[in-house]
Image (cartoon, grey):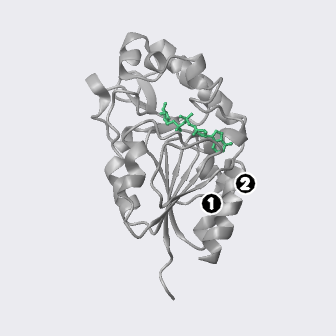
Amino acid sequence: MCAKKKIAVLTGAGVSAESGLSTYRDNNGLWDNYDPMEVASIEGWFRNRAKVLDFYNGQREKLRNVQPNDAHRTIARLDDNFDVCVITQNVDNLHERAGSGRVIHLHGEVTKVRPETGVYDESYSEREVLDIGYEKVVLGDKAPNGSQLRPHIVFFGEAVPKIERAIEVVSGADIVLIVGTSLQVYPAAGLYRYARNDAKIYIIDPAEVPVNESRVIHIRENATCGMKKFLSIVNKE
Ligand code: APR
């Protein structure tokens, strides 16, 4: 029995667009309607915690009412024939709800919160992370250690603790599949460059992508159609 081929799937907001969740930078995207420096940055958190909590309460409520789409489900079905690790920038739980077995959330998870500990909040431990599902968190909601509960999100201005693990996964992959990201936010956007020279790289996105490496195959479709095309390509290899 030969070892299964390894696929690293790097996803962004575009993979959840067909579930009805807004992307960040498409027209009328989240960052057209909210200032990320106010609602998604560590400075914004210290400036106005209630505003940040309210933003993520809204994102959590939206997530309660949407379902994974066929792109999430097709990605999850890759687990049957490949050794797959999904590395997502998304804070939604749609990959898990579609059945993907290995998911790394580079930018955190909106269904989770953790205690606010000191400045630049990198000193927390995983066991302090609480899963609250789709419930709200407000000012005055405290963690067991007595500090204010904050979203378990990597705010702009904070480190990305899981990036080393993600680099390891991409460096060991036979295939790197990028789905629905504008590749604007580092270090996530630079991950695909850690692909081995003999690895194949595919990008699924209906728009132009900021990658001009000839070996990168751009499937210019939305995520659900693009995943069908990817599946037919990769099952023939
Ligand atoms: N199918 C596939 N791709 C799509 C679809 C779709 N139906 N609709 C839009 N896209 C593509 C867009 O063309 C764009 O390239 O998805 C991408 C969305 O880009 P962004 O909105 O910038 O989202 P993302 O790349 O995930 O943002 C990265 O920025 O603000 C931070 O932390 C936030 O994780 C987020 C990070």
Report x, y in % for residue 122: 29, 34
Report x, y in % for residue 191: 39, 50
**How far, Cα to Cα, is label 1 from label 2?**
15 Å
Which disc, if any, is residue 223? none
Q: Quadrant of residue 73?
A: bottom right
Report x, y in % for residue 51: 50, 13
Instruction: Name which of mark 1 and mark 2 comes first in the sequence.
Output: 1
- Position of 228 relative to 143 (above/below): below
Q: Is residue 139 visible?
A: no
User: Circle 1 is placed at which residue position?
Assistant: 76
Q: Secondary structure at mark 1?
A: helix
The one of 123 and 158 positioned closer to us in this rendering? 158
- Say which amino acid is labelled 2: Cys
Q: Tell me the crowding category of disc 1: few under 14, some 14 to 19, or many 20 or more residues within 10 angstroms, Cα based.
A: many
User: Circle 2 is placed at which residue position?
Assistant: 225
- In this rendering, which labeled residue sits more in front, label 1 or label 2? 2
Report x, y in % for residue 170: 40, 59
Q: Secondary structure at mark 2?
A: helix
The one of 114 and 101 positioned closer to us in this rendering? 101
Please count the marks in the image.
2
The one of 189 and 119 positioned closer to us in this rendering? 189
- Say which amino acid is labelled 1: Ala
Residue drawn at 55 percent across, 22 percent down: 31
Q: Do the residues under discs 1 and 2 have CB atoms within 8 angstroms?
A: no
The one of 233 and 126 positioned closer to us in this rendering? 233
The image quadrant in which ligand 1 is located:
top right
Q: Is residue 223 visible?
A: yes
Residue drawn at 58 percent across, 67 percent down: 79
